[in-house]
């Protein structure tokens, strides 16, 4: 039996790189600069992300997240669009993956109809929007002729995973029989040092007492 959308409390995710916002090592400082470049949608960095994901996929990683029966959907920005040229890293990353033929197709599908606080500006986890708030401020805005077998939500950075879980709930509401997973370029590793940025992983995001957790 397919669980009801409201009961969705876990989603599988993958990530390519690590990022330490607090570290002082060379790799940690480099990761901070790289994340800034990704969020600014610098073309060279977006292109390289596509290349790295393809290398990982051809090497056996992310087989459940990419492939010829997967529809890629970008995570909406934290606020509705005000200008057409506003930076949207998730969309650029999705396009880079599609250019390298790592999916069956792409779709906008999700849109933010009500703004939420931007998580990157909030250092305390308790201040960040939770899955319920993301779910309540996002809707499926695109019409698909039929439910795709698999959808992968694409984002630039995953911290706790509240946004990805909220998006997964919205999609599951519309397509209850669809396998929904999430793929981020970077996973945040707070209050620790990293020795290298390139560390592809697959894991999960789940709720415990209403609080999202990510492993690893």
Image (spheres, rainbow, N blue to C red):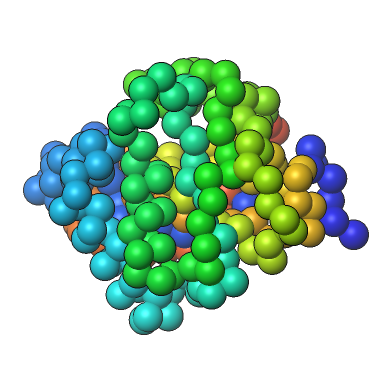
Location of residue 209 by image quarter:
top right
Residue lying furthest left in this view? 26
| 168, 12: nearer the viewer | 168
Q: Is residue 73 above or below residue 148?
A: above
Q: Residue at x 85, y 56 (%)?
A: 2
* Residue 41 showing in the rendered view: yes
| 102, 169: nearer the viewer | 102
Q: Residue at x 69, y 66 (%)?
A: 149
| 15, 213: nearer the viewer | 15
Q: Is residue 127 above or below residue 169?
A: above
In this picture, residue 112 sits left or right of residue 58: right
Q: Residue at x 57, y 19 (%)?
A: 114
Location of residue 145 by image quarter:
bottom right
Q: Residue at x 49, y 68 (%)?
A: 103
Q: Is residue 184 above or below residue 126?
A: below
Residue 89 at x, y = what percent?
34, 41
In this picture, residue 114 sits left or right of residue 24: right
In this picture, residue 196 sits left or right of residue 145: left
Location of residue 120 by image quarter:
top left
Residue lying furthest right in this view? 1
Residue 190 at x, y = what percent?
33, 38
Residue 95 at x, y = what percent?
38, 55
């Amino acid at each position: 039996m397919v669980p009801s959308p409201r009961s969705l409390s876990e989603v599988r995710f993958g990530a390519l790189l690590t990022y330490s916002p607090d570290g002082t090592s060379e790799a940690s400082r480099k990761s901070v600069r790289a994340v800034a470049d990704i969020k600014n949608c610098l073309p060279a960095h977006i292109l390289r992300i596509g290349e790295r994901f393809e290398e990982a996929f051809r090497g056996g990683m992310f087989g459940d997240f990419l492939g010829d029966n997967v529809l890629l959907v970008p995570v909406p920005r934290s606020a509705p669009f005000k200008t057409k040229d506003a930076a949207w890293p998730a969309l650029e990353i999705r396009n880079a993956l599609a250019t390298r033929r790592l999916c069956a197709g792409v779709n906008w599908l999700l849109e933010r109809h009500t703004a939420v606080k931007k998580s990157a500006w909030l250092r305390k986890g308790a201040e960040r929007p939770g899955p319920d708030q993301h779910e309540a401020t996002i809707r499926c805005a695109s019409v698909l002729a039929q439910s795709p077998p698999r959808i992968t939500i694409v984002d630039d950075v995953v911290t706790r995973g509240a946004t990805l879980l909220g998006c997964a709930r919205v999609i599951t509401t519309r397509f209850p029989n669809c396998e929904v997973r999430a793929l981020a370029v970077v996973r945040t590793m707070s209050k620790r040092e990293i020795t290298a940025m390139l560390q592809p992983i697959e894991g999960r995001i789940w709720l415990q007492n209403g609080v999202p957790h990510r492993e690893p």
